[in-house]
Image (spheres, rainbow, N blue to C red):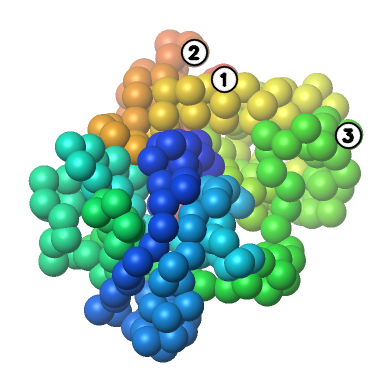
Amino acid sequence: MPELPEVETIKRGLAKNIIGKKIIGFDSDWQKMINLPLPRYKRTITGKKIIGVERRAKMLIIGLSDDWRLWFHLKLTGQLVFSGKNKKVVGGHPIKEGFEADPNRFTHATFDFSDGSHLFFNDVRKFGWVRLYKKAELENKLAAMKLGPEPLDKNFTLDAFKQILKKKPNNKIKVFLMDPQNLVGLGNIYSDEVCFFARVRPDRTVKSLKDGEIKLLFNGIKKILPEAIKYEGTSFSNYVNALGEAGAYTKKLRIYQRYGQKCLGCPGQVKRLKLGGRTSSYCPSCQQ
């Protein structure tokens, strides 16, 4: 599943191409992907203009005129494709058919714009969704999720991080970082990278952290996420950036999925363990 840097990259790529466009048609062949009966969904968004593209946690929100919002979650294999005259912008799961031809057999929702361009929602496993709500209703939905702060927000300070940590002292550090009710946007990749940056084992408990280690974790979040956005994310089996290319941050990773290999910080070997149902990589020498 794309994490914060990947979704932010998709958001920025789409924002450059779809803001200001007018929707003149919509279709979907998968009712579970949308939250309203298709005729009503289609009738509601037809004629609306796109006024903005935002990200909350790992989700995308496309603002429409008349206070309507499209709420996207790509889940494991979702992909958004903007297709215009002599231009294609792709973000999300790399589907071979998705970049060469759209629509294709994985296309389950299509937005048609007045200038002849389109936005396709492709999804191999059909876990993703695009829900339509009024702005106030969506805000209530998001509030009910009790999401934690955005790590790149200016209000997310070291003191704020310390207060959040106090709420779940018995959590394993990596499990804590991956829980969106504590902090949004960090998944398996960047939680590994942040723990390695801070030189702490991912399976230690939150209450075991010393002040210096908390500051290093905080600094790691503030350093690694913006850098990953700069290089347009990480690409393994489930992500391409807004140009349909592999995210270049893959080459910058220090620990993720390096188990069995030599550590980049010492002569030791990277090990792995299971935390929260996910495989975690760590260095027994560098991370204590």
Residue type, numbered disc 2: Gly
Mark 1: secondary structure: loop
Measure how far apart labels 1 and 2 are at the Cα level.
Answer: 7 Å
Residue 145 visible (yes or no): no
Q: Residue at x 82, y 47 (%)?
A: 164
Q: Is residue 191 above or below residue 134?
A: above
Which numbered disc, 3 or 1, marks the residue that appears first in the sequence?
Answer: 3
Mark 2: secondary structure: loop
Residue type, numbered disc 1: Cys
Residue 33 visible (yes or no): yes
Circle number at residue 265: 2
Q: Is residue 64 above or below residue 160?
A: below
Q: Residue at x 68, y 38 (%)?
A: 151
Mark 3: secondary structure: helix
- How far from the left and from the top, in percent, is residue 21? 41, 51
Residue bearing mark 1 = 286
- How far from the left and from the top, in percent, is residue 75? 41, 60
Q: Nearer the viewer, mark 3 or mark 1?
A: 3
- Identify which residue, 245 or 21, lies in the foreground: 21
Q: Is residue 230 above or below residue 87?
A: above
Residue type, numbered disc 3: Asp
Q: Are marks 1 and 2 in contact (CB under 8 Å)?
A: yes
Which numbered disc, 1 or 2, marks the residue that appears first in the sequence?
Answer: 2
Which quarter of the rendered picture does the C terminus lie within? top right
Residue bearing mark 3 = 159
